[in-house]
Image (tube, grey):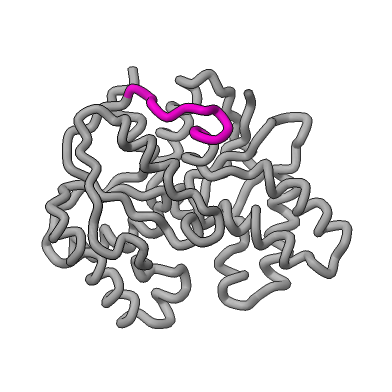
Amino acid sequence: MKVALFVPCYVDLVNPEVGVSVVRVLRRLGVEVVYPEGQTCCGQPAFNSGFFDEARAVGRHFMDVFEGEEEWDYVVSPSGSCTTMVAHYYPFIYENLPDERDRAEALAPRVREFSDFLVNVLGVKDLGARHEGRAVFHTGCHQRRELGVLEEPLELLRNVEGLDLTGWKNEELCCGFGGTFSVKMPDVSVAMADEKIKALDESGADTLVSCDSSCLMHLKGRLRRTGRETRVLHLAEVLDENGG
């Protein structure tokens, strides 16, 4: 198995250690990982802001970089949000451009979110990881509503030795980030984050885990501003612990 690693902007610029953990986990499973250096953004910020022409331009570059069907089997990304952009919205933004729509539709099934790839492609649920603590898991909106990847990260976390995975109130609620939403409506965004943090406090968890660094950045920022020291980790970082 050979995969191309697609590193989202927030991982690249804010949490590069997440990309490192993804590579280490995949290599331990015998997967060959390559990093196409020409990659940039997937175009989601432009798309979410209504700049479809700009999003299409970024998407064309993405497809040029990642199509490589003869070079790798899948494109793996540690982000439900960015995976959704490529796998679900590329065919939409090129709907009236047949050649590019065909390219987008051919690429879409090969672009997989990290936990989805581990469980549903590799068939792996236990990576021999160990992490001490009590954790809750936050499912990002795109991963929940577009990809439907809900159980896969939970299955992986349940097999982490020493980790007490607990439920929390209104887990399905958005964290309030929403990309440019948090910039356009900061007061609402902060209120939504505070609602999640209240539920986190009530759960008694000392660790917050998610598959999206953007959600984690938003919640971690609010946690620190309100004086909380809750550990905030991407799923890949937890699975990478004590992995040998």
How many labels, in total?
A: 0
- Residue 121 lies, in percent from the top left, at 58, 32
Task: Give the image quarter of residue 49.
Answer: bottom right
User: Does 154 appear in magenta?
Assistant: no
**In terms of secondary structure, what is the magenta stretch mainly?**
loop
Residue range corresponding to the magenta coloring = 118-128
Q: Measuring 34% from the left and 75% from the top, which residue is drawn there?
A: 189
Q: Measuring 76% from the left and 52% from the top, which residue is drawn there?
A: 105
In the image: residue 151, left or right of residue 95: left
Q: Measuring 31% from the left and 50% from the top, which residue is drawn there?
A: 137
Whether residue 191 is situated above or below residue 13 in the rendered picture: below
Whether residue 213 is situated above or below residue 4 in the rendered picture: below
In the image: residue 230, left or right of residue 41: left
Q: Quadrant of the N terminus?
A: top right
From the viewer's side, name the closer residue of 192 and 220: 192
Q: Quadrant of the C terminus?
A: top left
- Residue 55 lies, in percent from the top left, at 67, 66
Q: Measuring 31% from the left and 26% from the top, which residue is drawn there?
A: 129
In the image: residue 239, left or right of residue 227: right
- Residue 238 lies, in percent from the top left, at 31, 36
In the image: residue 50, left or right of residue 230: right
- Residue 108 lies, in percent from the top left, at 69, 49
Whether residue 117 is situated above or below residue 95 in the rendered picture: above
